[in-house]
Amino acid sequence: MKFNFLNNQFIVQFFSIICFLLITVSCLAQTNSFINNISIKPGFSIVNKKNDGYYTDKSILFDVSISYKLNRYINAGIYIGKATLMHQINLPYNPTTGYYEWYSIDSTSSIISNGPGGYTSSSAVFYGIKSEIHLLPLFFKKELKFDVYLTPQFGCVNEKYEVLRDYQEHIWSPIFWEYGIGMGIGYRFTEKLGVFMEYSIGKYYNTNKNRFTSGISISL
């Protein structure tokens, strides 16, 4: 299986945003007890890079979810993430060369392919709402280090990709709605820090039907 990682610039930006959120929320937590019920989960998933029925090309989706603890049983929150994908484009056939080709009007950009379906890199943003339904409190009154929960989610995806006109241009795709439900497990090393893994099934972008996510959990 071939994995394609996001560029270093985005990774730096991603973790910079997480650090900024942690610092900001931690400062607010000194004076606001509301913050003490908030948890942050940065993580990653493996997703299909193309929407063409082939599953050999994969990409990493980095995301972060922020949720509020309503009670012992339910957390509700939001998530946002980003991944670098490949968007399919249609290329005209050139009978002189025998290739499918496109050239910009100023001849500064070009794409050449053996087939009519070429690909260009794209950037996709994932965001939506997500909740956690904790199961162990139904059986144990004591707070445990382990956690088992159901995790329904509903959200959307926007993909920014190239279109081939006189020049290379980038546009945003229409919103794609995705949804799913899964089960997660977590373990807390300390009161504030832990790890988690989630497996969900549903309708996801680029014909994904399931998603495995893992990362760290931070309680404020």
Image (cartoon, rainbow, N blue to C red):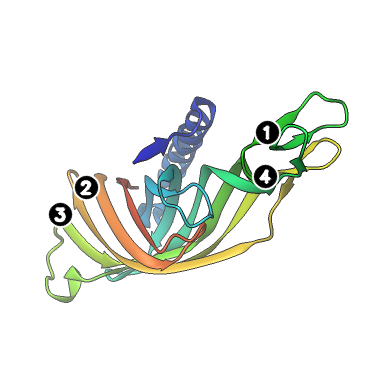
Nearest to viewer (mark 2 / mark 4): 4
Quickly name the residue at label 2. Answer: 191
Could you tell me if the residues under marks 2 and 4 are in contact, i.e. CB atoms within 8 Å?
no
Quickly name the residue at label 3. Answer: 145
Answer few, some or many: residues within 10 Å of disc 3's Cα (few below 14, many 20 plus, some between 14 and 19).
Answer: few
Residue 185 spot, x, y in % from top left: 22, 58
Q: Earlier in the sequence, mark 4 or mark 1?
A: 1
Secondary element at image label 2:
loop
Could you tell me if the residues under marks 4 and 1 are in contact, i.e. CB atoms within 8 Å?
no
Secondary element at image label 4:
strand
Residue 185 vertical placement versus 16 (above, below)? below
Secondary element at image label 3:
loop
Could you tell me if the residues under marks 3 and 2 are in contact, i.e. CB atoms within 8 Å?
no
Q: Earlier in the sequence, mark 4 or mark 3?
A: 3
Q: Give the position of the N terminus as an image quadrant.
A: top left
Q: CA distance from mark 4 to mark 3?
A: 43 Å
| Circle 1: residue type | Ile
Residue 60 spot, x, y in % from top left: 43, 42
Nearest to viewer (mark 3 / mark 2): 3
